[in-house]
Image (cartoon, helix red, strand yellow):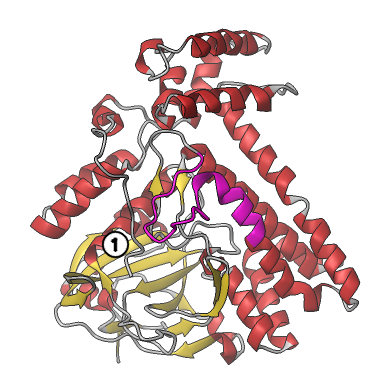
Amino acid sequence: MNHTKLEGAGWHFDNSYAALPEIFFARQNPVPVRSPKLVRLNHALAQSLGLNAQALETEEGAQVFAGNAIPEGALPLAQAYAGHQFGNFTKLGDGRAMLLGEQLTPSGERIDIAYKGSGRTPYSRGGDGRAALGPMLREYIISEAMHGLGIPTTRSLAVVSTGEAVMRETALPGAVLVRTAASHLRVGTFQYAAQWGMKEDLEALAEYALQRHFPAAEDEDNRYLALLKRVIRAQADLIAKWQLVGFVHGVMNTDNMAVSGETIDYGPCAFMDAYDPSTVFSSIDSNGRYAYGNQPYIGVWNLARFAEALLPILHEDDEEAVKLAEDALAEFSGLFQQSWLTGMRAKLGIFNVEPEDEAFIGGLLGLLHQHHADYTNTFIALSFDRETETQLEQAPEFADWRERWKARLGRQPQSMEQSQQLMRASNPAVIPRNHRVEEALAAAVQQGDYSVMDRLLEALANPYAHASGHAEFAVLPEPPDLPYRTFCGT
């Protein structure tokens, strides 16, 4: 595999993950593709990484993003991990992904640069290691939307079409996504270490996670317990943020749960329109395991698997290790509820705390569910005091709830104007509505027209601006004949 300096690109690689015990990875070069073409480059992200977009928007840049050439300093490898997939434990790994290394940014961050769709690896389990253009563009859109919403997330640096077809149910145009992340350490990475490694391997992985994500915890008496507690807190906060914007991840397997607290692996994800806790979009989630309302419960279930993996290093006494883990896990519910309640109060313009707030908020959500009202647009209507712009306007119970809400706002020192400012900063006017995402993907994949996607991305970049030009993205779709379904895109 050729290495290239790509003069002026700004690559500044380090390879700290490659210093871990070799059980955690397999050295592997990407499989070259026939005719790479750069179809999307994330200019804002490139700049924050210290990269020169102009140098990357070249034929040589497309070769790098496709995996045909490797940037100088990169050390490609496929990561090993395990995971509970729909509750069933299995050995996994980067079957179609590859870590190039870590870009050291001008601000001092260490950011993973990884390929997705870069060919077979030792962990491919019979797959072709490739990806289709549509799902890679979908990840680009949704991950950028999450970033705009202020939710921790992996991001998409570039998408390259390969000039090759991938065979799924039909032949589809192939692509490689270049993804960035705080790291690709997963709950499943620790499960892999606990199941197939030595205690020393597990300790090395835990030390690496602490150094990379939670360096302040290294000075605590029980550093591995500190790691567990910080991951629990990060995940509680992350999932609360998902719930606040109506995001449904769709496949919350333990291998899709990053210890950094970032959202990772955008497969069958989507955003909820009408509020319904049982909302499921994924075509493979027939039992609703990963439904919107189940996400907090699955989160703590996954964290319990993380805690189990850490037991050998939490304490030398097995019973004490279990107790430490159980006590830490017991904190999740309170952490999640606190984060979610704080966010919901902000969505309703509430600055102070009253004991009845949770029941009061639950009353509104119950009305939304009962009347199939749109989640996002209802909060926008409240933010701008537009009583007639909600699907609840004809419901007498909602009129009663509104009166109690106004009285609730009156019991705090802030003015109504201040409450509305808080609400507008907390309620996005634009989310990646499913029909808009599908519209953008169809134009790009079927017609080579990226203008629809560009307009959507522009609106998603600043969802709290409430710009008049973005009003079209808040318009609800026509009622579908069949429920909206998403697919993993493998």
The 10 Å Cα crowd at callout 1, few under 14, some 14 to 19, many 20 or more, is many
The answer to whether 294 is drawn above or below residue 363 in the figure is below
Residue at the spot 30% in from the left edge and 44% down from the top edge: 434
In terms of secondary structure, where does tag 1 sit?
helix
Residue type at mark 1 is Pro
The answer to whether 281 is drawn above or below residue 463 in the figure is below
Residue 399 seen in the figure: yes
189 or 461, which is in the foreground?
189
The answer to whether 308 is drawn above or below residue 356 in the figure is below
Residue at the spot 61% in from the left edge and 21% down from the top edge: 350
Where is residue 284? Give x, y as percent: 40, 61
Residue at the spot 78% in from the left edge and 52% down from the top edge: 330
Span shown in magenta: 277-301
103 or 392, which is in the foreground?
392
Where is residue 140? Give x, y as percent: 32, 57
Q: Quadrant of the C terminus?
A: bottom left
Where is residue 353? Give x, y as percent: 72, 23
Per the picture, the main secondary structure of the magenta-coloured stretch is loop
The answer to whether 422 is drawn above or below residue 298 in the figure is above
Query: Count of labels shown?
Result: 1
Where is residue 404? Give x, y as percent: 60, 10
Q: Quadrant of the N terminus?
A: bottom left
Using the rendered view, name the quadrant where residue 247 is placed: top left
Residue 220 seen in the figure: no
Q: Answer whether residue 383 is magenta in the image.
A: no
Circle 1 is placed at which residue position?
A: 135
